[in-house]
Amino acid sequence: MANQTRDIIHLAALLHDIGKFWQRADVSYYNSPQLAKYPFVMKNADSICPTSQEGYFKYQHVIWTQLFFEDNLAMFEKLGIYDKSSQDNLVNISIQHHKPASKLQAFVQLADWWASGIDRSTSEYQEGDKVKRGKLKFKEEPLISIFGNLKVNNSESKFAKTAFNLTKLSLNNIFPTTEKYQAGVSQNEYAELWTAFSAEFKNLPTDSLQVFNTSLHYLLKKYCWCIPASTIDLADNSLFDHLKITGAIAQSLYDYHCENLSAFNYNQKLTLQQGHLPLLLLCVDVSGIQKFIYDISSKFASKSLKGRSFSLQLMLDEIANEIIQKTKTTLSHIIYSSGGKFFMLLPNTQAVKDALNKLEEEIKNAIWSKYKGNIYVCMGFEAFAFDLNKKTVIIEKEHKTLGDLWKKVSEKTAEKKYQKFKNLLLADYENFFSDEGIGHGGQKAICSVTGEESDEISKIDDDVKISSQVKEQKEIGQALAKNDYLIFSKSNQPNLKVRNYESLIGRNYWLLTNKDLLQTENSEVCLTVKNEINFIKPQSTSAKNTAYSFRFYGGSESALDKKGESKNFEQLAGIEREDNDKEGSLIVKSECAGLFNRLAILRMDVDGLGQLFIKGFNKETASFSAYATLSGQLDWFFSGYLNTIRSKEAYKDWVNIIYSGGDDVFAVGRWDNIIAFAEEVQQEFKKFTGRDDITISAGISIVTPKFPIAKAADLAGEAEHLAKDFKRSDKKEKDALCLFGIAVGWEEFTLIKEIKDFWIEHLNAENPVLSHGILQKVFDWYEISKQKDKQGNLNLSWKWNAAYSLKRYESKNNKQKNDALKVIEIALLCNQFRENSIRFDVFAVASRWAELILRDKRNYNLKHKK
């Protein structure tokens, strides 16, 4: 009975505020046709709604929550989770959360307080920024972007508020705007959205509570992502995140109560006894993922990189799923999951802690067995409670901020990285250092892609042999581009007639086409979103016990060759090989305008994201709902919207996203397209956040297609670090791009493009105004400008050398040339390009960019003249 009660409490809490959605879509309390349909609900208002001093019902949304349950009672009865005769049935526990009549009902009330009592932002609006709504403000206030209320470097935002459209989640509508914030939303928009939600809700699978909960979680995400949880103050937390966090807390409180019966007192409301910490914040960090992804030789790397990346992302999901199964919790308990790390809210019970400790060792052993130390997982957790009066969390009897808790758990988890294999070493010292543990010392065949020994090697040609792991990654990478659905299952699915890939722990997974969906059973069908989210498929008698979900996946589509396969690195760089020669030799041709066929590797991420989670929220109003909302919005952009950018004409044939999620991007492509892609990602991220002080930095390395991809990725990583270290004269840091080994601020990039265009205009092949020798001189002067003597003084000899050389280039009869030389002279000696102040670094980056474009065009012209 206790197990069913905890399930009831979770579902009741998950749906406790669903009435807010319907109330905003419906007409008034007195005129609602739904209330006329269920007159006993109106009669029940006095039992579930507190009254104001004036005698008016407060929190009327619970009336619509009851209407929702009544309208869908048959589904809950089929799930076996509703008992009409019980006072503490599913409906009553949910609708009584503002006026509980029992201890069980009060668990949802306390969870609601803990989830919302400190997430209702009371931050002041900027002067003149607050929009005056009418009496129906609760129906007119849009969801405000959470980025607008974050503090960066301990400073409040001075940027205009932006808000989201009221619409189903898709990659076409994730950008907030100031116009929507000013205009607000309407009852008609709510009504349209509610009608669609209600229809889809009735199609949810009801074969079991687990598949129902999974599918419901994603349905709420699809429709409630854009609905504010509260419109009283600054409405920047979504209803979806508030619902799921309330569900997680309610279930956790009940589990703690079952193990600690004296922890809570009930007297019309629930109070926690001093000294009890009923919740755990868990952090799981899988380290080494990025390095492992690209620690691979270039040959066939392009075919296996995407599958390699995707496999590791699935491993993270699988670990989260195992924790959910072993702790008997749900998806609601996951607060943040991306970029190789996730956080969960769990009950602080001995059973949960024992399960986590046991599972951590099982996962470590499994990962060691498969990846031999290249990948490692760390877990850390901390017990805590909320103190609503002081608006703090309690950790080890001390009052702290939520940011302090987040930081402590992160640090606790990170500390374990310094003792990675301690337990493995102690448990089996001999095997740890044996041939089986660390390799076979030349006794087995070597994989041509990873350079590792393997028992199972497949021969591709005379020179290339790949391990079964790489072969699997290659197949997954190819399948990702062709299929929209991913199936998770605990058992083999022979009906689907596609390969089942065995996962690291727990369950199998495989990719398939849409037509096979109705053949699945005892599974989870997951849509990999490419645009619209139509993830719930029609039920059939053969699709039993099947849950439905969706995910955004960075790199869901690839640049394809003429055969419809993902392009390799040569093809991405612009090289296409054909067997045209009678002798069978390969002839190299270019698909691009020129012949400077180079590959670029891009790495970029958000600057100081960890500090945003720790210090970005107001200390009194930070909440897990806010953290979940921020995490979700980042995921939409990096895992989802980047695919929209990549699909544009300028990039779709020349850029492949290998990994994008959390706040990280790793992409490869033709060098000039990657530069443009990086700039567009930066510009779009600025629009998405609506502010200039939440920034993103990037590093780009440019290599030949044959260059080792692992080394190229390292070079891009070093470039990204240089960008992160970039400082301006006003001490502003980061927000930069490192290109050609030189870090420049993104604010300088427009000027870089102007200088680049200046060089191309005056050095064009048809009628050059200047000689290419001047460009080479600029590079020489730049190198000298960076030299220092023993005292640390810069070498300034380049200045008089530049002045002298530029004077010699002048022509008595060519005013256009002399004017161009004057522009260069002022830029170098006066740090001024036309009307803009510039640094020599900026001029050097622009010059190098122009030189590569000109080399491209020059080689192309020479080839075609022949």
Image (cartoon, grey):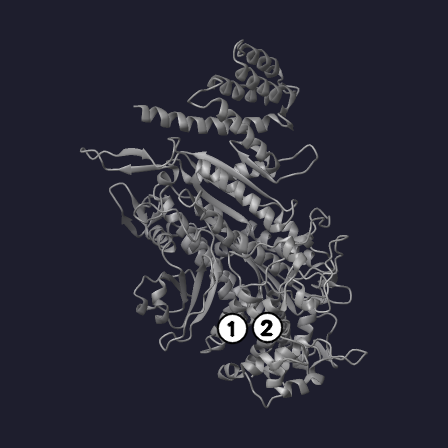
In what quadrant of the picture does the N terminus appear? bottom right
The residue wearing badge 2 is 14
| Residue 92 locus on image (x, y percent) | 63, 83
Q: Which residue is mark 1?
A: 213
| Rendered location of residue 11, percent (x, y) | 57, 76
Picture quarter with the C terminus: top left
Mark 1, Cα crowd under 10 Å, few <14 / some 14-19 / many 20+, is many
Q: Nearer the viewer, residue 530 or 448?
A: 530
Q: Residue furthest left?
A: 582
Percent coordinates x, y for residue 271 in the rendering: 73, 75
Which residue lies at the image location 77% right of the left edge and 64% below the top edge? 390
Give the quadrant of residue 853.
top left
Label 2: few (<14), some or many (≥20) within 10 Å?
A: many
Q: Separation of disc 1 and disc 2 at Cα?
A: 10 Å
Mark 2 or mark 1, which is nearer the start of the sequence?
2
Relative to 74, is 657 above or below? above
Residue at screen point 73% across, 76% down = 58
Is disc 1 in contact with disc 2, using a CB cutoff of under 8 Å? yes
Between 596 and 814, the one nearer to me in the picture: 814
Q: Amino acid at mark 2?
A: Leu
The amino acid marked with disc number 1 is: Asn
Name of the residue lying farthest toward the right:
53
